[in-house]
Image: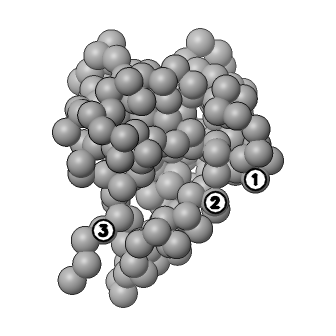
Amino acid sequence: MTKPYRIITVCTGNICRSPMAEFILANAARDAGLDVEVDSAGTTQWEIGNPLDSRAADVLSRHGIPTTAHTARHFNTAWFAERELILALDTDHFDALLALAPTPEAAAKVRMLRSFDPAVAHVGSQAQGIYDPWFGDDHDFEVSWALISAAVPGILAYVTANGAARGTDRG
């Protein structure tokens, strides 16, 4: 039996962007029959223990993405060793994760989520961020949905090419 390919998505507080990316990506991997585990965390401790923002949950629901209970948590540096891919949702998360990386090998696991979106893959990380929808309204959460979703096919192709096995049970 193979180990699942492990991905973590990371934003500021772990109540909006990173859990949205977690649920979107986990759903897509499951639909593709890939043995991938996805979770999420925040770079700050501001929201620890809080649930998924209701606006994020509403957007996911409108797009048919099932969610489970979510509790915000802070990124743990031990996870560099436990994850194959660490996806930053914005440039400040990317920079924070690189600063936390204990080795060059760990730092190499950190990527901007949108670096997998063909529309912006060719630009630098500074132009690949997803702004924080928390300060906005439903439209801002829909924008986050669209930007995250555009990167998902590229992420799935990458993880398939880099060791994600196809599962036998798509249930």
The numbered mark at residue 154 is 2
Instruction: In the displayed orientation, state which residue is furthest to the front.
Output: 104
Residue positioned most to the right: 119
Q: Secondary structure at mark 2?
A: helix
Give the amino acid at mark 3. Answer: Pro
Q: Is residue 22 positioned above or below 18 on the image?
A: below
Q: Is residue 165 above or below residue 9?
A: below
What is the C-alpha distance between the residues marked 3 and 1? Answer: 26 Å
Give the percent coordinates (x, y) of residue 138: 66, 26
Question: Disc 1 vs disc 2: Cβ atoms closer than 8 Å?
Answer: yes
Q: At numbered mark 1, what does the secondary structure look like: helix, strand or loop? A: loop
How far is disc 1 from disc 2 in space, using C-alphas? Answer: 8 Å
Q: Nearer the viewer, residue 169 or 56?
A: 169
Instruction: Depth check: give the residue in front, 56 or 152.
Output: 152
* Position in image of residue 79 (x %, y %): 25, 42
At a point 70% along the width and 34% down the height, the residue shown is 124
For label 3, count other residues whose C-alpha is less than 10 Å away and answer few (under 14), some (14-19) or many (20+): some
Give residue 39's position: percent from left, percent from top: 34, 47
Instruction: Give the quadrant of the N terminus.
Output: bottom left
Asked if labels 1 and 3 touch by Cβ distance under 8 angstroms, the answer is no
The residue type indicated by label 1 comes to Pro
Q: Which residue is mark 3?
A: 4
Q: Are marks 3 and 2 in contact (CB under 8 Å)?
A: no
- Residue annotated with mark 1: 118
Q: Quadrant of residue 158?
A: bottom right
User: Residue 20, percent across and down?
Assistant: 50, 40
